[in-house]
Amino acid sequence: MRQPPKNTIAADAIKAWRITALIYELIFWIAIIVFAIVTYYFELPYWYVLIAAIIGIITTYLSVFVLPKVRFKRWRYEIFEQEIYIQHGILIMSRTLVPMIRVQHVDTKQGPILKKYQLASVTISTAATTHEIPALLEEDASELRDRISALARVDEDDV
Amino acid sequence: MSKEQRLHPAAILFNLMKGLKEMVFLIILGFFTFRDSGLLYYILAIVAIIVLGLVSSFLSWYRYTYRIENEELCIEYGVFIRKKRFISKNRIQSIDLTQGVLHRIFKLTKVQIETAGSGDGAEASLQAVKFAEGERLQNELKNGITVVIEQNDDEPEHPTSTISFKRLFLAGSTSGSLGIILAILGGGLSEIEQFIPEQFFETTVQWIIGLSIFFIAGLAFLVLIIVWLVGIAGTMIKYGNFTITKHHEELFITRGLLEKKQITIPLKRIQAIGIEESILRQPLGYVTVFAEVAGGTSGKGEDAATVLFPIMKQEEVASFLAEFLPDYAIKEEEWTGLPKRALKYYLLRSSIFFLLASIAVFYFFPKFSLLPVLLLLVFIYLGHLRYKDAGYQVKGEQLLLRYRLFSKKTMIMYHNRIQSFEKKQHIVHRKQKLGNMHVSIIGKMGGAHFYLKEFDVESIDHLSDWYSYRDI
């Protein structure tokens, strides 16, 4: 765990994350606007709307423009014959080792936003934990899934 | 292979009572609402409910059959929608026999069969069968798990250990959170005088208030004593007659005074062994030994892990493990502890809440500021203990982890039982060359997870090298 894993995820992940963040922020801004209208009609103090708007601006800036890039830079994975090595996390960086023989199943999944960029995420489950590699190219994701499931198909002592 | 069998007819009764128990509130409520106007109708309705309940209990009993066929337990049930459930013998994790008070009157037992599935509740649960039948089932089904040669004369004697009454009493009186509350309040009670604002004593009703405060304090004390006694009784009932026996490849536990429970744990299914020293037992030198077992039922609190022995002397652990779980026998060696620079994290984490609380109380209620300050000191001390107790040890394929939340826990696990290993660092950690680690094993309800914080990064990398299957 001294060296970071080698492979990065697909670069389009940044775009996909931006859109996801944008959708959440949009909901937040709608709420702020509704709040502002209510404040206007009932003549409540404008303080709270102002605070909410400032929070909205800051979170929008961070989650849409800053964080996706940083997150992409941090997200790394590497598949060895014996184990899976994942690194992620912006403030708290975490590196995880999952031995192949502990893998119970592997899934790929794809939401509408990932689909737009031909991306898919891979979920790896052990008997106690689940780990996700988000946003790989579709082909890479399914190739990875098949590879892990082939490597994991080792009979050892079962639970 | 055996033919289809039904549960004991007493299951009808159990079912009915279970149904009525759920409705008891409704029935009482109904009584008070219809007491004056329609008592007759009310009684009729109750009779109808009972008859309906009886009919449906009878039907579900009649339609519930089980058999053992082709190495599988096959259960068919459902009154209108027929359901069949097949449980393969070698997927069965454990078979528990439980005898409630009612079961014991009829010499019956409840059989709970668990697989590794993560859903809650047992995979299959036979409400009531004859005790002998329960044992027959247990014997027949567990053949899938391990080959047990019973009644073999030239076999060496099975190691057995039983809890003594004295120990049981001690376990009860030092059990759980009640004890902690007692200790805190016991200490706090003598200090209570200081928390009473002085004006109280200057008023003319000084004597009365003084009396009533002592009266309240006395009453609180009495309640605590009762709660404590209830705690003792609870432990006695739960762990009375606790016996653990080792058969070839499995541990066999019977316990309980009122509700008798028999638990079978195949050694192969044990994921980790834990030794817990709770705050109250640690000064007396007593510990609890438990096991993390892969299994379906959701447990809460003390039941989350399977207790292998409720209470024993610290010194006896080594010989207990050597006898019952030779694979997990421990030799105390040097623990790799935390570096000095980790201490401040531990102190801050454990005291931050009370630090803020103290400031708030100091600001708003200066008269009562002694209490949060005392708690703050207690938690700073706890933080120091947590720092001191955290550590790990690697011996061949074995990993020992030690940590404290309130109780000090030592976990013993094998390399091949660990499901994943994670290293976590935030920015400040990285600057100070510290890191947290997170080790996961299979346990009840989605696994057991152990978090050890602020180790030297070198130690964590060393552990990860040990864990990694690659040659580094």
Image (spheres, coloured by chain):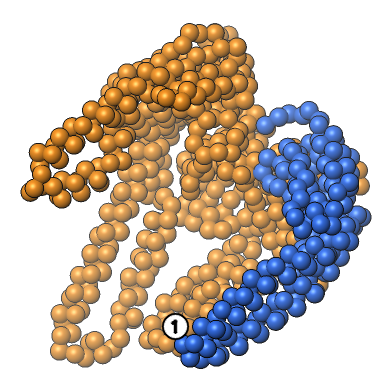
Q: Quadrant of the N terminus of chain B?
A: top right
Q: Which residue was labeled with disc 1?
A: B361
Q: Residues within 10 Å of mark 1 (few under 14, many from 20)?
A: some
Image x and y of residue B110, in percent: 41, 26
Image x and y of residue B62, in percent: 37, 18
Task: Tell me where residue B438 sits by quadrant.
Answer: bottom right
Residue placed most toward the observer, B101 or B63: B63
Task: Tell me where residue A100 sits by quadrant.
Answer: top right
Q: Is residue B345 left or right of residue B85?
A: right
Residue B166 in sight from this viewpoint: no
Q: Residue at x 19, y 90 (%)?
A: B203
Relative to B219, does residue B147 appear above or below in the rendering?
A: above
Residue B253 in sight from this viewpoint: yes
Q: Residue at x 89, y 61 (%)?
A: A11
Residue placed most toward the observer, B251 or B395: B251
Residue placed most toward the observer, B262 or B78: B78
Chain letter of the orange region: B
Q: Is residue B208 left or right of residue B311?
A: left
Instruction: Name the amino acid, label 1.
Output: Val
Q: Residue at x 32, y 18 (%)?
A: B9
Q: Residue at x 67, y 72 (%)?
A: A26
Relative to B246, does residue B228 appear above or below in the rendering?
A: below
Residue placed most toward the observer, B85 or A129: B85
Chain letter of the blue region: A
Q: Is residue B58 left or right of residue B357?
A: left
Image x and y of residue B212, in percent: 19, 74
Image x and y of residue A133, in percent: 79, 52
Circle 1 sits in a helix, a strand or a loop, which is it?
A: helix
